[in-house]
Image: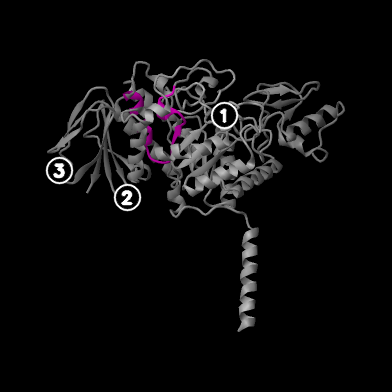
Amino acid sequence: MKRVQKALCIIICALLCLSGCRANRPAKADRPASDDRYRTTYEVFVSSFCDSNQDGIGDINGIRSKLDYIEDLGFDALWLTPVHPSSTYHKYDVDDYYTVDPSFGTMEDYEALLKECHNRDMKVYLDLVLNHTSEDHEWFRAASDYLRELPDGWDPDPSYCKYYDYYNFRRDPADGYTQIEGTGWYYESRFWSEMPDLNLSSEAVRSEIRDIMEYWLDKGVDGFRLDAVTSYYQDDPAANAEFLRFLTETARSIDPDCYLVGEAWTDQSSIASLYASGIDSLFDFPSAGRDGTIARTISGNCAASDYVNEMVQAENLYSNVNHGCVDAPFYTNHDMDRSAEYYPDDDGPAIKMAYAMDLFMTGNAFVYYGEELGMGGAGKDDNRRAPIYWSDDANDPEMCAGPPDMDDVRMKFPSAAEQIKDGESIYSWFKEVIRVRNEYPAIARGYTEKADSISDASVAAFYRRSEEYGDLLIVMNLRSEPVGKKLPMLKRKARLAESLTTNEEKMTYKRGKINMPAYSIAVFVIK
């Protein structure tokens, strides 16, 4: 018997050793992967968020110190703008894909952030910039040095310098190309002369990308935000879709639960063509920004019913080419003017309502840091990335200095410390809207059906249908005046479960008639 026990102990120890040698990926949440992609995600522009060491630069430990704040708002995922080393404040020109910029902290800091987020069932998405590197990346430096030393008239040979094949070089000038100083060679650089474009058709580059993805997935990241997916290949949508398919298949071969969301700043039909790649999500740019459907509706340039029509159209268009896709609605991001700038005469209700429209769309909804405070910032990119203001104390050690060329961005609404205490603040509105989004899973996971008998120029009404989570009727008053609506189709088949108002006025519902204050939302549960 002792021999048997000893043999069993040896086998168990061996199995434990083997498991310890595997990649240390964290355990996934209990919900299935298809459902787990429906999150509410907070975008953090790292250098402007929270400073933990008083050097004026936001950092990873600063983000970690604010996880209670983020979680308390109701967010369950984080998208961090690039954390890789770079000479710029925004880090979208990567020097090294395998390390963390020292101004943001260490790899140990990043791993600690991942661990704490996962303990809270909060996902973390890494911003992966693949269209280009920085000119200081070792690949580009090696390729440039090789071309500088290449005798006149000689053809480059990748067998002597494999990095020559990593970028797009040519001997004559052309639009979108920059000259290598002291040579007759030019490299593609569509975004900026200091951002050389990668040759994404190179098998060697694709192998490098696979290694990069595997490295970070093994670290524990839950997915990637893919930068500039419409620019992987210049004016070649089919090639962009093919490369997205490569990225999607590569990520899933490493980790089947890996989530991918792409930045496709384009129209609905072009977004649909990219969804054919099989990617999980693409940002819903047609609804976002100063000229998107949300802002145009709140400003009165679109009927409220147009908001519903666009949701239905997008859901049908995207699901027809990718049945499992998850829309990624958002309202603003680090490349857009802050939403408070869209309504200069508004003292809060319009801003609140516009973001509710974003958060009541299906999919994985994204919110840019500081929007929950009604932050300002417009014009050049630096102003759009101003530091979040945690308190009114200019010497608050957590406050960041902000981008070096930022103008004096004045904030219209109080600081986070003040808004947290105010039940009528923009912060409190965000918290309540996200609570409703999370409490009724059909909002994010269902499909939209028009309620044309209710919708009109002022009121947006739609059903959100879900076999698993039940059906809802959502009615939004998107105007600054109160409205009354008869809802005879409900009779006794529904109950008013939630009433969200942007001011202290009350919503009433009696005998099939609802009276809605300005900028308010009613959520009915269909029995």
**Disc 1 and disc 2: Cα gap in Å?**
39 Å
Which mark is drawn over residue 47?
A: 1
Q: From the viewer's perspective, is residue 216 above or below residue 398? A: below
Position in image of residue 195 (x %, y %): 66, 27
Q: Which residues are magenta?
A: 349-375
Query: Which one is in front, 223 or 207?
Result: 223
Q: What residue is pinned by disc 2?
A: 469
Is 149 included in the stretch rendered in magenta?
no
Residue 476, can we see it? no
Residue at x 59%, y 52% (from the top left corner): 253
Q: Which is more N-terminal, label 1 or label 3?
A: 1
The amino acid marked with disc number 1 is Ser
Crowdedness near tag 1: few (<14), some (14–19) or many (≥20) residues, C-alpha within 10 Å: many
Q: Hey, which residue is sitting farthest left in the picture?
A: 511
As drawn, is 78 to the left or to the right of 155? left
Q: Are marks 3 and 2 in contact (CB under 8 Å)?
A: no
Which mark is drawn over residue 491?
A: 3
The nearer-to-camera label among 3 and 1 is 1
The nearer-to-camera label among 1 and 2 is 1
Q: Please, what secondary structure does the residue beneath circle 2 have?
A: loop
